[in-house]
Image (spheres, rainbow, N blue to C red):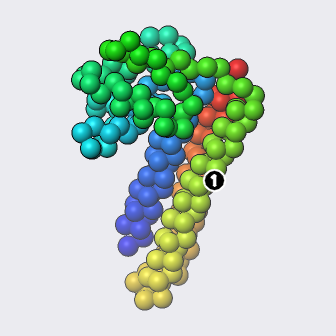
Amino acid sequence: MIKELMQDARDRMQASISALEDGLSTIRTGRASPVLVEKLMINYYEQQTPLNQLASISVPEPRMIAIRPFDSSTVSEIERSIMASDLGLTPNNDGKIIRLSIPPLTEERRKEITKVVGQRVEEARVSVRNVRRDTQNDMRDFEREKLISEDELEQGQKELQKLTDQSVEKINALGDSKHDEVMHV
C-alpha cells in the first residue's frame, strides 16, 4: 500500500519538477536559445501549431535566433505571433528566414525576470507540498481503515517527508541556477 502511494507521490513530484524545468527554459536570459521560441503557437490554417513543427530553428550567433519556415507562406504569420508574444523581440525577415536579435537585458528587466523565476519556483514548491498533503491524507485514511499499522504510517510519513525535501531541494537548485543565469552579465 505505502509503496504504491510513494511511487505515485514520486511521479507527481517529478512531474512538478519537469513542469518547472520546461517553464524556466522559456524564460529569456540574454542568450539566444531555440527553446525561447520553439513552443510559440502559430496560427497555421486556423490551427494553433508549435513553431518547431513549422520551421527549423537555429542559433547562428550567440545573440541571434534564425527561423527558417518549411513553407515560406507562413513567414508573416510567424512574425505576427512573435510580435504578439511576451518575448519582447522584433523579428527581421528576408522573405525566407526570420532573424531574432536578442538584445542584452537591462538591470531592471533582469530583476523583473528574477521575480518571474521566483514565482514559478514557489508554484512548483506549492505543487510538491500539495502532493505531500494528499499522500499523507491517503496514508491516514488507510491507517483509519486498518489497512496499514500505525508504525507503517509513521515510517511512510518519514519517507514521504524525505522525498518532499529532495524534491524541494531540486526545485531550489533549478531556481538558483536560472537566477544566476539571468543575472549574469
For the residue pair 183 and 140, the one nearer the viewer reads as 183
User: Above or below — where is 104 with respect to 146?
Assistant: above
Quadrant including the C terminus: top right
Q: Is residue 155 visible?
A: no
Name the spot of residue 51 as percent of width and height, x first. 35, 32
State the residue lying farthest toward the bottom: 145
Considering depth in this image, is 73 or 117 the residue closer to the camera?
A: 73
* Residue 64 visible in the displayed image: yes
Residue 36, position in %: x, y?
Answer: 48, 31
Image position of 172 (left or right of 140): right
Q: Quadrant of residue 53?
A: top left
Relative height, residue 170 to residue 69 (above, below): below
Q: Residue at x 67, y 25 (%)?
A: 105
Q: Residues within 10 Å of mark 1 (few under 14, many from 20)?
A: some
Total marks placed: 1
| Front position in the image: 23 or 6 | 23
User: In the shown orientation, is residue 105 left or right of residue 71?
Assistant: right
Quadrant location of the N terminus in the rendered image = bottom left
Residue 52 image point, x, y percent? 33, 30
Rendering quarter of residue 111: top right
Amino acid type at mark 1: Glu
**175 w.r.t. 135: above or below:** above
**Which quadrant would residue 50 be assigned to in this image?**
top left
Element on which disc 1 rests: helix
Residue 82: x, y in percent? Answer: 46, 31
Residue displayed at 40% across by 62% down? 8
The residue that label 1 is drawn on is 122
Residue at position x 50%, y 10% in the image: 61
**Residue occupying image coordinates x 35% and y 31%:** 77
Residue 143 left/right relative to 176: left
Apparent side of residue 167 relative to residue 180 in the rendered image (left or right): left
Q: Nearer the viewer, residue 85 or 16?
A: 85
